[in-house]
């Protein structure tokens, strides 16, 4: 063991080296820095696609550390026990990390911080996941925001910390502690046959994130305000999975787009507003952590949702076989790519919770299994917003009509043909790849007939409105 102090830098959802205050401070202190990833319960409970996405992120991060003269140590087990083990093995005197703001992470980190301090180990957490820490943004009366627009008005002129550069090098102890490999974590195990297909759509890592941000700001941003609603266009930043895994910081996205906004490009303002929707989700998950498990508006807890996740309508929804093209295209897009266009997300969530009267939690769980950009805050907010049970929610009486939505946002059927092979005489490769991605036990294939609609949009809307009215909404 050397005389030089060692700091453990505990990596969680901050898989980057630039604009990473925890890492920068550790490196600037002059101590040895040992970057550690711990596969604890928080990670082992993730769904199939997020775990698979995590694997790609870790592989990329490992390379980055090697390029900086360091290495990644990977361990598995309860974080508190693993950190203690590493402290004993390395003689580390400090542990630093970037703050995560979801309730499970907060509970874990609070206990660990107390435990470390009680054992005379310095423990410090830093910003990293959000632009505006939730406790620093408050209403005039000192409360938290429940509605997006006043939240936006309150943060839009706030100072955003400048983007920090990556360290040039990281000095780590020469004696490497034992480590698992990324493969040892078997993060793709739950993907069954779909991993080869999904893998083609993943570009993991910090460099990919930076490139996407640059490409977006060099082009699509100028028409982003209008084009972001068109599901067949590549008109959005596609940064959500990078932001979810912390491969890029929201500060860097904000600071890079801000000059374009000052140049008067409307699309840049819309982009900043979208980043602030993400902030709002974190504001809410911090102040009202029940958003992940219970209806945010208490009165919705008693709503007679359908809760059978094996109901044939729910199965049809998950499998992209409702016979409603917009819904099915979006569900198949998610199954193949791990992403779904935002318009599609709003559409399928409205269809499940309103037309099919099914609990938003069933949809939230399916998304948690299928999305590579799964994010506890944005997913919970998106679902509750769509269902009407959440903050600043779409009014319960606003039931998206999947047919008129399609006429408006995909009038030429480009998106639906991209994803539904049965609707075309010459099916696209993307639509056919769906049949290679799905599990065999779903028991249908490209030769199967496209099903008739499980419900007419008008009938579903009428039924939903009747139930709302009977329940006194
Ligand atoms: C039911 C439902 C579930 C959702 N689940 C998730 C999720 O698990 N993870 C996730 O990142 N987003 C989620 N969203 C929000 C949104 O659909 C995605 O963030 C967006 O489609 C990502 O594409 P993009 O990166 O190209 O976004 P862009 O349009 O380029 O926006 C830039 C960034 O702003 C943030 N953002 C944009 N829209 C929203 C929004 N409505 N809410 C919160 N943040 C937003 C994202 O971080 C995004 O990367 C959900 C929306 C709904 C309706």
Image (cartoon, helix red, strand yellow):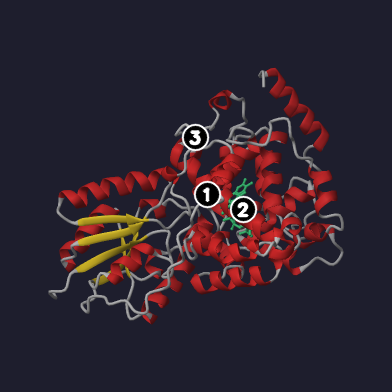
User: Which mark, residue 274?
Assistant: 2
Residue 249 can be seen in this image:
yes
**Which-is-in-front pick, marks 3 and 2?**
3
Residue, disc 1 = 279
Please state, as top left, top right, bottom left or bottom right, where the C terminus lies in the image: top right
Q: Where is residue 342 in the image (x, y as percent from the top left)?
A: 67, 52
For disc 3, the marked residue is 140
Above or below residue 350? Residue 74 is: below
Crowd band around label 2 with a 10 angstrom C-alpha radius: few (<14), some (14–19), many (20+) = few
Quick one: label 1, few (<14), some, or many (20+) residues within 10 Å?
many
For the point 37% across and 75% down, which residue is it? 167
**Which of the pair 22/100 is nearer the observer?**
22
- Coordinates of residue 304 in the picture (x, y in percent): 62, 25
Q: Is mark 3 on a helix, strand or loop?
A: loop
> Please, what secondary structure does the residue beneath circle 2 have?
helix
The residue under the point 38% across, 48% down is 105
Res. 339 mark: none
Q: Is mark 1 on a helix, strand or loop?
A: helix
| Label 1 close to label 3 by CB (< 8 Å) | no
Closer to us: 184 or 373? 373
Which numbered mark, 1 or 3, is in the foreground of this view?
A: 3
x and y percentages locating residue 410 in the rendered image? 82, 55
| Along the viewing direction, whichever of 30 and 381 lies nearer the viewer | 30
Total label count? 3
Camera-nearest residue between 364 and 211:
211
Residue at 74 percent across and 35 percent down: it is 399
Does 169 sit left or right of 336 as displayed?
left
Which badge, 1 or 3, comes first in the chain's sequence? 3
Badge 3 or badge 2: first in the primary sequence: 3
Residue 333 percent coordinates (x, y): 68, 58
| Distance of label 3 from label 2 (alpha carbons) | 24 Å
């Amino acid at each position: 063991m050397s005389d030089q102090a060692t700091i453990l830098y505990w990596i969680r959802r901050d898989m980057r080296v630039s604009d990473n205050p925890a890492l920068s401070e550790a490196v600037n202190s002059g101590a040895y820095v040992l970057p550690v990833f711990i596969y604890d319960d928080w990670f082992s409970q993730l769904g199939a696609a997020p775990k698979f996405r995590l694997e790609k992120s870790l592989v990329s991060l490992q390379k980055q550390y090697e390029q900086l003269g360091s290495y990644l140590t990977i361990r598995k087990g309860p974080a508190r026990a693993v950190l203690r083990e590493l402290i004993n093995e390395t003689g580390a005197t400090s542990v630093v990390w970037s703050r995560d703001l979801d309730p499970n992470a907060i509970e874990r980190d609070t206990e660990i911080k107390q435990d470390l301090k009680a054992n005379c180990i310095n423990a410090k957490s830093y910003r990293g996941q959000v632009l505006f820490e939730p406790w620093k943004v408050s209403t005039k009366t000192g409360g938290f925001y429940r509605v997006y627009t006043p939240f936006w008005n309150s943060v839009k002129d706030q100072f955003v910390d400048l983007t920090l550069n990556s360290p040039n090098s990281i000095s780590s102890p020469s004696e490497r502690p034992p480590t698992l490999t990324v493969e040892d974590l078997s993060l793709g195990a739950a993907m069954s046959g779909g991993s080869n297909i999904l893998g083609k759509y993943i570009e993991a890592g910090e460099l990919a994130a930076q490139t996407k941000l640059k490409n977006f700001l060099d082009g699509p941003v100028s028409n982003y305000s209008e084009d972001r609603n068109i599901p067949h266009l590549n008109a959005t930043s596609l940064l959500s999975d990078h932001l979810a895994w912390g491969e890029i910081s929201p500060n860097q996205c904000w600071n890079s787009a801000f000059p374009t906004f000052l140049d008067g490009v409307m699309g840049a303002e819309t982009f900043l507003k979208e980043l602030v929707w993400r902030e709002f989700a974190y504001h809410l998950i911090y102040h009202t952590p029940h958003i992940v498990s219970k209806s945010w508006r208490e009165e919705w807890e008693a709503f007679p949702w359908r809760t059978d996740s094996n109901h044939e309508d729910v199965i049809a929804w998950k499998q992209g076989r409702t016979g409603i093209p917009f819904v099915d295209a979006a569900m198949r897009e998610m199954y193949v790519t791990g992403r779904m266009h935002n318009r599609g997300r709003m559409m399928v969530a409205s269809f499940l919770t309103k037309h099919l009267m099914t609990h938003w939690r069933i949809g939230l769980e399916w998304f948690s299994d299928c999305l590579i950009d799964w994010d506890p805050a944005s997913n919970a907010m998106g679902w509750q917003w769509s269902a009407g049970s959440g903050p600043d929610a779409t009014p319960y009486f606003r039931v998206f009509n999947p047919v008129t939505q399609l006429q408006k946002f995909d009038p030429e059927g480009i998106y639906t043909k991209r994803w539904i092979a049965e609707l075309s005489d010459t099916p696209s490769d993307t639509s056919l790849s769906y049949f290679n991605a799905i599990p065999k036990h779903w028991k249908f294939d490209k030769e199967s007939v496209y099903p008739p609609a499980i419900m007419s949009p008008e009938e579903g809307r009428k039924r939903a409105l009747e139930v709302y009215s009977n329940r006194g909404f």
